[in-house]
């Protein structure tokens, strides 16, 4: 009888029961206050009117507007395969993206070929080799071009291992072939912050490459120090760890990401920054801090959840400053 009641209640509030008819966590929460403990450990179901009242309460709770700083984020912090998500014209309308700033997922082949163990404790369901990651970046770039998601003046910035950048360059440049482009390999100097594990065959990794592709000869922002007549340095010196990374443990320096976005947007706010391999959301957080919009895609639920929390905090912090 109780199991049948649970089944009826589940239909009303749209939750699922476990195979044995036990209450799920959602059921326990939803039914709080409906069951009254009786003698002998038995419980008695409330009346049908009480159940229907619960149904209305659940619907009313679901209809409540999201807290400030969260509305619309379900279309901006996307849990999906990036190639699939980019085909959604509702989320990625025509000529909407100004900048791609991303750190593609690579590393499956790093332990054997580069001499150190990956130090991340995050597990990935489908880890990629650097060659596979480079090809994936090329496919993403082609999608952005073929679907006309990027603006006519657009900048691509992607991190990649400095000794594997030769795999990435032809894939991304091939996607933009025939367009008016300039490109350059930039360097992130981690200021002695690279991996320090001993290895007799390799040098320490205290720098990382950044592939810069400028589509349509988009002008870069003047230097932050006001020296606009000087060329930008191709070496960015930022510590791998900084004080802003503690809570969410971002993979990349937030200060560096903000600097790159500032350059790529000419210092203007309101641009849409895309990260198709979002990780923990550091690109979105940097974009929010500069007053820009963002679209980030992550296929790993654990990483997506961290990114979601980081974005919510950044948006609330930004709204408090406004």
Image (cartoon, rainbow, N blue to C red):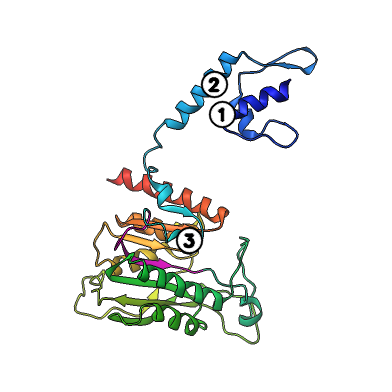
- Tell me the quadrant of the picture where the N terminus can be found: top right
Camera sees residue 190: no
Residue underneath mark 3: 84
Asked if the residue at tag 3 contacts the one at tag 1, i.e. Cβ–Cβ closer than 8 Å, the answer is: no
Q: Which mark is residue 54?
A: 2
Query: Which residue in the rendered view is the most extreme toward the right?
Result: 40
- How far is mark 1 from mark 3, CA to CA? 31 Å
- How far is mark 2 from mark 3, CA to CA? 38 Å
Mark 2 against mark 3, which lies toward the viewer?
3
Q: Total marks drawn?
A: 3
Q: Image point 70% across, 36% down: which residue? A: 18
- Tell me which segment is drawn in magenta: 91-104
Earlier in the chain: of badge 1 and badge 2, it is 1
Question: Residue 116: where, in percent of width, then height?
Answer: 63, 76
Query: Which residue in the rendered view is the most extreme toward the left?
Result: 229
Q: In terms of secondary structure, where does tag 3 sit?
A: helix
Locate residue 149: give its quadrant: bottom left
Residue 90 falls within the magenta-colored stretch: no
Asked if the residue at tag 2 contacts the one at tag 1, i.e. Cβ–Cβ closer than 8 Å, the answer is: yes
Residue underneath mark 1: 13
Query: Which residue in the rendered view is the most extreme toward the bottom?
Result: 201
- How far is mark 1 from mark 2, CA to CA? 8 Å
- Tell me the quadrant of the picture where the C terminus can be found: top left
* Left/right of residue 151 with respect to residue 31 in the rendered view: left
Q: Image point 45% across, 26% down: which residue? A: 60
Question: Alpha-carbon neighbours of circle 2 within 10 Å: few (<14), some, or many (≥20)?
Answer: many
């Amino acid at each position: 009888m109780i199991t049948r009641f649970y089944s009826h209640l589940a239909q009303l509030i749209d939750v699922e029961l476990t195979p044995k008819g036990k209450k799920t966590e959602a059921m326990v929460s939803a039914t709080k206050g409906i069951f009254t403990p009786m003698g002998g450990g038995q419980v008695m179901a409330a009346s049908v009117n009480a159940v229907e009242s619960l149904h209305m309460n659940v619907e009313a709770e679901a209809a409540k507007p999201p807290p400030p700083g969260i509305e619309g984020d379900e279309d901006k912090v996307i849990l999906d395969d990036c190639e699939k998500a980019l085909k959604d014209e509702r989320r990625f309308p025509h000529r909407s993206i100004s900048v791609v700033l991303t750190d593609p997922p690579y590393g499956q082949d790093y332990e054997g070929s580069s001499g150190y163990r990956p130090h991340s404790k995050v597990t990935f369901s489908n880890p990629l080799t650097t060659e596979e990651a480079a090809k994936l970046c090329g496919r993403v770039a082609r999608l952005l071009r073929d679907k006309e998601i990027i603006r006519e003046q657009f900048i691509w910035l992607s991190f990649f291992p400095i000794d594997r950048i030769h795999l990435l360059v032809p894939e991304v440049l091939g996607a933009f072939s025939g367009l008016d482009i300039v490109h350059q390999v930039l360097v992130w100097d981690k200021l002695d912050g690279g991996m320090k594990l001993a290895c007799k065959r390799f040098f320490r990794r205290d720098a990382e490459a950044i592939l810069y592709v400028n589509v349509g000869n988009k002008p870069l922002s003047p230097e932050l120090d006001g020296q606009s007549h000087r060329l930008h340095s191709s070496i960015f010196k930022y510590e791998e760890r900084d004080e802003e990374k503690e809570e969410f443990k971002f993979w990349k320096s937030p200060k560096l990401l903000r600097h790159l976005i500032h350059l790529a947007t000419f210092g203007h706010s309101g641009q849409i920054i895309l990260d198709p391999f979002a990780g923990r959301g550091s690109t979105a957080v940097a974009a929010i801090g500069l007053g820009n919009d963002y679209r980030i895609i992550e296929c790993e639920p654990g990483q997506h959840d961290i990114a979601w929390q980081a974005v919510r905090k950044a948006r609330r912090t930004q709204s408090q400053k406004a």
